[in-house]
Image: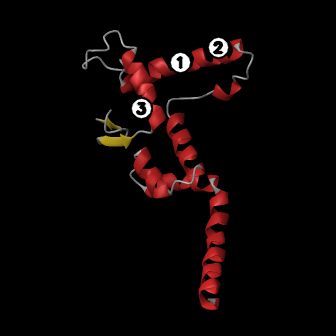
Amino acid sequence: MLAGVITVPRSKNGHTRRVPTNSRVRALLLDLGAARQRPDDPTEPVFPCRHAQADKFFPKAVERAQASLKAARKDASGLDGYTWHCNRHTFASRLVMAGVDLRSVQDLGGWRALAMVQRYGHLAPEHLHEAVERLVRVESARSDATSA
């Protein structure tokens, strides 16, 4: 926790992974840890349900979220068909749209091959425009240097 890293002992590809966390995730995990039945017991897990059981608890969590949205008179249809695995795609998509390079997305998401991550590259077309605009800045800097 103090290092800002979550260790996943056995990820989807069977390997141990270390995933950095941001300040929002750290704050959430600290809140969840403090809300445990025995918050001073370091052996009590924050998430008592094991990954192998995600197919058991996740559909119920989605149903509760849909019910909460409906009770608040909000559209819950965005959660129709939402599965645990969708979180990986959402994570990768949001990283790409935030301008994170695909190699970093690969490392953060734990994909073994860059080809698996490249499907998200289309989500950030504005970054392509920004990339070619850098040429204008480089050319302007060269012009300024030669005229000085």
Q: What numbered label is drawn on residue 67? A: 2
The amino acid type found where label 2 is placed reads Ala
Q: Residue at x 31, y 20 (%)?
A: 45
Image quadrant assignment for residue 29: top left
Q: Position of residue 88 (x, y in %)?
A: 49, 39
| Marking on residue 117 | none
Residue closer to the observer: 83 or 95: 95
Q: Is residue 129 left or right of residue 22?
A: right
Cα distance in 3D space between marks 2 and 3: 27 Å
Colour scheme: secondary structure
Residue 121 lies in what quarter of the image?
A: bottom right
Q: Closer to the camera, 48 or 144?
A: 144
The first of marks 2 and 3 along the sequence is 3
Q: Earlier in the sequence, mark 1 or mark 2?
A: 1
User: Can residue 5 be seen here?
Assistant: yes
Disc 1/disc 3 C-alpha distance (Å): 21 Å
